[in-house]
Amino acid sequence: MEVTDVKTFVVDADWRNWFFIKVETDAGIHGVGEALSGEGLTTALEATAEAHKHYVIGEDPLNRKKINRSLRRDPFAWRAGKLINAIAAAFDIALWDIAGKYYEEPVWKLLGGKVHDEIPVYANGWHIGERTPENYAHHAEKAVSEQEYPALKCDPFAHYEYSLSQEQIDEVAELLQAVRDAVGWDVGIALDCHGRFSRRGAIEVANALEEYDIMFLEEPVELEDRQVMADITQHVDMPVATGERIYNNETMADLIRTQACDIIQPDITNYGSLREAQHAAAMAKSRYMTFAPHNPNAGVSTAAALHLCAGIENLEVLEHMSRDVAWGEEIIEHDFEVEDGALTVPDQPGQASRSMKTPLVTIPELRKIVTASLMQKVR
């Protein structure tokens, strides 16, 4: 079996783009992967995939190690950079999809087996809209009561940076109080800081909001100095999570070695390969840390994440978008419905419960949102 062609697809998914790779073979089996996209990176992903597809075409799609090594090591000038790792990850997911279909086994079995039949999830995206207590309360209640999410994550900090004034802290507290009033105290609440605070500002925010029983504090500061992140982790009375922007195990190992957080959050569409993500989870396990993949992405990412998480012993939780474009299932068909706070691990061959629509994104009503580049659409 050989790879015969590689195609890329870009979809405008409202506040960001989805980026897919389809790998075709001479056996009539195809696989679909996804790369993390956003902030105007779509054209760069397309160009990188086009420039590097010669590492894949003509190769045996079951020889993932050789292909992944070529993609990540052979481009010397940009070796193992973020774009290359994202494209390598997309190819890797697609190749696992092919392997599952070829062997007629679910990907989790090919990855070594599972210890979880269901993967616990938390909701992201539920609070999109007005930054008011009323909107937060309304959508929090819907996510919990109608969609059965057991936990919610939000960034209630607007675009505040470094440190917050007392007035700003009170403003954030009002939002969280509205959520607690709406969903009660059995529902988890995680706070995403997007790396915007200073060391002192992060500690002050965590201390001020501790009373709302925070599930974890995500990316309180940037990751350039792991010692600072470790210092914050030691000084706040809530778990700290980070790692979505890390894209290799060298950096992740440093994060884990310095005990810079309690929960690591690699994004499998950004991390080079599913095996590398497995290794990251194993490193974290050796230091008694847990694993909670970043996943504000499309259905391909979620499918691959479910198969990966099925075999992770130190799994904490998986991120899942509770509100997304209404036509999302026109792009990928799946059975991923949250029930009792979890998603069921698929048992069908490949990675998804059913399959990516083929041909991708050519449904007439969706043509208007598919272009070669949608940089201007990304906010």
Image (cartoon, rainbow, N blue to C red):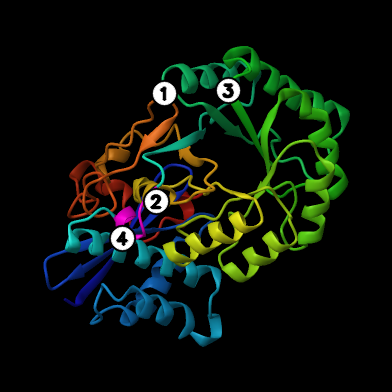
Task: Name the quarter where the N terminus is drawn.
Answer: bottom left
Q: Earlier in the sequence, mark 1 or mark 4?
A: 4
The answer to whether the residues at label 3 and label 1 have Cβ atoms under 8 Å apart is no
User: Is 369 contained in the magenta span?
Assistant: no
Q: Which mark is residue 278?
A: none
* Marks 3 and 1, how far apart at CA: 13 Å
Callout 4, which amino acid? Answer: Leu
| Residue plotted at (36% across, 40% down) | 117
Evaluate whether residue 318 shows in this view. Answer: yes
Q: Residue at x 19, y 59 (%)?
A: 101
In the rendered structure, which disc, 3 or 1, sits on the residue that comes first in sequence? 1
Q: Secondary structure at mark 2?
A: helix
- Say which label, 3 or 2, has the lower sequence index: 3
Q: Which mark is residue 110?
A: 4
Q: Is residue 139 above or below residue 358?
A: above
Report the amino acid beneath label 3: Val
Q: Say which residue appears at 31% left-offset and 60% top-offset.
A: 110
In the picture of the structure, the residue carrying the numbered disc 2 is 301
Q: Nearer the viewer, mark 4 or mark 3?
A: 4
Q: Helix, strand or loop at disc 4?
A: helix
Three-letter residue code for mark 2: Ser
Give how far apart the Cα atoms at labels 1 and 4 are.
31 Å
**What residue does disc 3 label?**
187
The residue that disc 1 covers is 147
Answer few, some or many: residues within 10 Å of disc 2's Cα (few below 14, many 20 plus, some between 14 and 19): many
Label 4: few (<14), some (14–19) or many (≥20) C-alpha neighbours in 10 Å: some
Could you tell me residue 48's position as x and y percent? Answer: 42, 73
Q: Position of residue 294 (x, y in %)?
A: 53, 48
Where residue 333 sits: x, y (%)?
24, 42
Q: Is residue 171 left or right of residue 141?
A: right
- Give the Cα separation between the discs numbered 2 and 4: 17 Å
